[in-house]
Image (cartoon, helix red, strand yellow):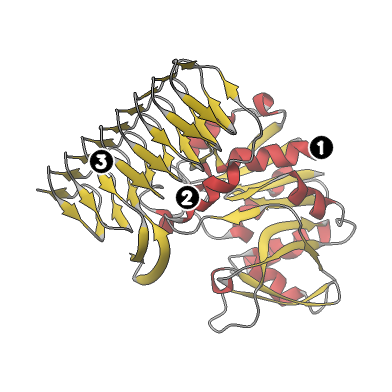
Amino acid sequence: MKAVVLAAGEGTRLRPFTVSRPKVMIPVGNKPILEYVVGALVANGLRDIVLVVGYRKERIMSHFQDGKKFGARIAYAIQEKQLGTAHALSVASQFIDGDCMVVAGDNLIDGRTVADLLQNCRVPAVLVTESEIPSKYGVVQVEGERVSSLVEKPERRIGNVISTGMYCLNQELLRKIEEGVAAGLPGITHVLQALVSRIHVSAVQTTGKWIDAIYPWDIIGVNAAALSFQGQDISGTVESGATIKGHVSIGSGTRIRSGSYIEGPVVVGEGCDIGPNVTILPSTSIGNGVQIEPYTYISNSVIMNNVHIGSHSHLSHSVLDDGARAATGLMSPSGPAYAKVDEEFFKLENVGLLVGEDSVIGAGVVTAPGTIVGAGCRIGNGVRVAGNLENKSVVV
């Protein structure tokens, strides 16, 4: 059986973190989300993988190449325009010569998730789970083990069981999806919605991991879930007087200076310089080439590649994208907040600062919980920031 992974989307609601990368390439636990998907498929013997790519496809193709490095054989289907999941699957049809598993490339999953579906692939099946925000997904209603109804993003609440975007499909359903695309139906759920009354589609509940990032602050929770490794893997240098506690991975060429305290789960990439006297607390990922100056505190955060954080800074429940730079004394505590994305308002229980790539933050800046700073912004010294800043904003 081949696996088709849908990885063409942009992830507009995750901006600014998808300005220059597709959603599937957002790093959590210092690996792109899509890498976890490929790993889960390979762990279950699904090595022939078709990646449907589109937006910023070069980022995906250069990372995965032919798949050999990941134990897979990867082919690429190009979806030039993102016209929905059914259209994406039709783009991959030239590579499919039998039954297949279809997987969304932008959800964090593990081997158990794939195994649950694989064990139930004797008939067409959809993997389902429960969600607190079912209106963002395809809501599935089940009678026994059979899908009786599937409604994409319903306007009123009809249940909380949703499609994960993972399917086992036979040739008959693949043909029906092709026909649906020709009839103008954009999504796989739209096609199945019209078919489930006539074709038996099983609903498979998963006991594995399935976590989606819809909005920028969701990256924090997905990252925490990704940090599930055990033990310590220290390839860098830990100076005398530094404390490493719990499940911590430190990459080669990284130096943890004296007086620093790291409590896992934490992953630190390669070529970083941290400390002295820096505190890093659980559920934090730090990418490659990061510099964190003395007396800085970081907790439950995602710090991506080539970030610089000045001394005496405080970051909690925050995300800093590639190349972001903060001078001395950045204060970004987490707490309850209201946030706005695409004209929607959200009440968040605990969130800190969210910063797009290559933004520069001056000394002594204080940010309110839930502040979203776009890519390429410039914030002057001693400024207080709240709300949303568009890309390339200047605040003085």
Pair 2/3: label in front: 2
**Where, quadrant-wise, is the N terminus in this rendering?**
top right
What number is the disc on residue 123?
none
Question: Dot 3 lies on which element?
Answer: loop
Task: Identify whether 12 is placed above or below 4.
Answer: below
Q: Do the residues labelled 2 and 3 touch (CB within 8 Å)?
A: no
| Amino acid residing under circle 2 | Ile
Q: Position of residue 186 (x, y in %)?
A: 58, 65
Which of the pair 329/176 is nearer the observer?
329
| Nearest to the observer: residue 309 or residue 106 | 309
Identify the amino acid type marked 3: Ser
Q: Choose mark 1 or mark 3, whichever is in front.
A: 3
- Quick one: SS at disc 2? helix
Q: What residue sits right under mark 3 in the picture?
A: 359
User: How far apart are the two marked residues, 1 and 3, measured between alpha carbons?
Assistant: 42 Å
- Looking at the image, which residue sits at the far right? 122
Mark 2 vs mark 1: give the one in front: 2
**Residue 86 shows up from this direction:** yes
Q: Name the residue under label 2.
A: 220
Residue at 48%, 26% (x, y): give it: 243
User: To which residue does mark 1 refer?
Assistant: 45
Q: In which quarter of the image is residue 390?
A: bottom left
Q: Is mark 1 on a helix, strand or loop?
A: loop
